[in-house]
Image: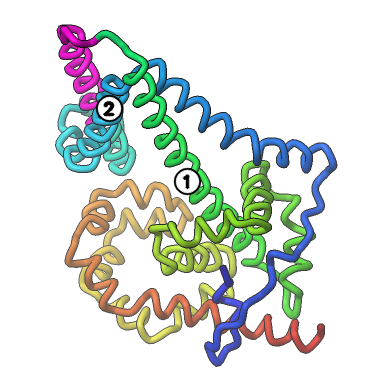
């Protein structure tokens, strides 16, 4: 996948062979990551298959239905579960929402598991047979493949975010590959592992399979990387703040009301951004569908892409001339 911010400033996409940069990890870490690259998927695959065989087809179906029910409850009923959280325990509104989602999902999952367990317990035909075990095995292996696929998507996204994090503050006229080779070993272990595994996947057919089956739109990857660039590069932030779309959007009545809030402005001057997010007005604004629609209609995402390309496009052109 290409990095759009390294396109030429005329916005003609230009692929950068980032797959070719060399990861300078220690021999021990390289061997460890290589072993884990093969053993983790294998263990997940066998673990779910063996568990499916032991549970049998009916119990495995019941477990998967309970899991799906828990996920559905977390999505649809998470907001309702917040009212059952005692007052004063969690002050942060976002944290309270997360706890509400988890609470709804866990309660629904446990309730469904107990219900199915009771039904199967009184099932006269619940004697496990070879066919029942084989069906559970097949279903477990399918579940294992699904988990491996989801894990691969997470690794892919994490690797691209990690590379964007490294490249965000790259010096003028620097080669992207040189920056990645020098700075990637300084990332935390999880980030280094995701970058290494992503490279290994690109060396074989796995990357093509993930690319074809990835349900996440390309725009999500690009937006995630551009937000990392925006947060870490002051030049991009300055360019973004001066775009016509952002200047116009700052006059939105919802935002002007926040500027006039003395509590929010005091936190802003003190760089207490987490405290700003705890304010009820901020929380309500981020849940306002009309406000979010105005953000989409204002073209903020296009302004972000243009700002990142302008700053890093120039860097890419200078690197090409010096190379």
Residue tagged by mark 1? 149
Question: What mark, if any, has residue 14 been given in the picture?
Answer: none
Q: Residue at x 65, y 66 (%)?
A: 167
Q: Dot 2, how many residues are within 10 Å of its Cα: few (below 14), some (14-19), or many (20+)?
A: some
Residue 35 falls within the magenta-colored stretch: no
Q: Where does the magenta region start and end?
A: 104-126
As drawn, the residue found furthest toward the right would be 27
Residue 294, placed above or below residue 116 = below
Question: What mark, if any, has residue 61 been given in the picture?
Answer: 2
Please give left or right for residue 75 compared with residue 163 in the image. Answer: left
Please give left or right for residue 137 compared with residue 255 in the image. Answer: right
Q: Nearer the viewer, mark 2 or mark 1?
A: 2
Residue 32, placed above or below residue 250 = above
Q: Secondary structure at mark 1?
A: helix
Which percent across, then down, holds residue 106? 27, 26
Residue 115 falls within the magenta-colored stretch: yes
Q: Dot 1, how many residues are within 10 Å of its Cα: few (below 14), some (14-19), or many (20+)?
A: some
Residue 179, placed above or below residue 122 = below
Asked whether the beta carbons under mark 2 and mark 1 sit within 8 Å of each other, the answer is no
Instruction: Please tell me in which quadrant of the rendered image residue 70 appears.
Output: top left
């Amino acid at each position: 996948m290409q990095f759009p911010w390294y396109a030429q400033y005329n916005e003609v996409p230009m692929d950068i062979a980032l797959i070719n940069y060399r990861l300078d990890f220690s021999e021990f870490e390289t061997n460890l990551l290589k072993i884990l690259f093969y053993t983790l998927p294998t263990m997940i695959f066998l673990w779910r298959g063996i568990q499916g065989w032991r549970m049998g087809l009916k119990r495995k179906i019941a477990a998967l239905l309970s899991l799906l029910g828990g996920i559905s409850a977390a999505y649809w009923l998470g907001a309702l579960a917040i009212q059952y959280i005692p007052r004063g325990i969690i002050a942060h509104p976002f944290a309270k929402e997360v706890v509400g989602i988890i609470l709804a999902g866990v309660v629904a999952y446990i309730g469904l598991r107990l219900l199915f367990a009771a039904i199967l317990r009184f099932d006269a035909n619940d004697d496990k047979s070879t066919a029942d075990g084989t069906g559970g095995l097949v279903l477990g292996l399918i579940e294992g493949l699904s988990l491996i696929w989801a894990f691969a998507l997470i690794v892919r996204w994490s690797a691209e975010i990690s590379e964007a994090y490294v490249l965000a503050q790259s010096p003028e006229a620097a080669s992207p590959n040189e920056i990645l080779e020098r700075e990637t070993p300084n990332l935390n272990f999880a980030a280094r592992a995701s970058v290494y595994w992503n490279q290994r996947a690109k060396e074989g057919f796995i990357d093509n399979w993930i690319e074809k089956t990835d349900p996440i739109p390309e725009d999500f990857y690009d937006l995630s990387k551009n937000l990392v660039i925006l947060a870490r590069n002051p030049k991009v932030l300055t360019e973004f703040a001066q775009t016509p779309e952002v200047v116009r959007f700052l006059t939105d009545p919802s935002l002007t009301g926040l500027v006039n809030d003395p509590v929010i402005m005091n936190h802003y001057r003190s760089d207490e951004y987490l405290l700003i997010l705890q304010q009820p007005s901020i929380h309500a604004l981020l849940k306002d569908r009309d406000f979010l629609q105005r953000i989409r209609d204002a073209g903020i995402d296009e302004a972000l892409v243009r700002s990142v390309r302008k700053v890093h496009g120039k860097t890419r052109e200078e690197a090409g001339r010096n190379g």
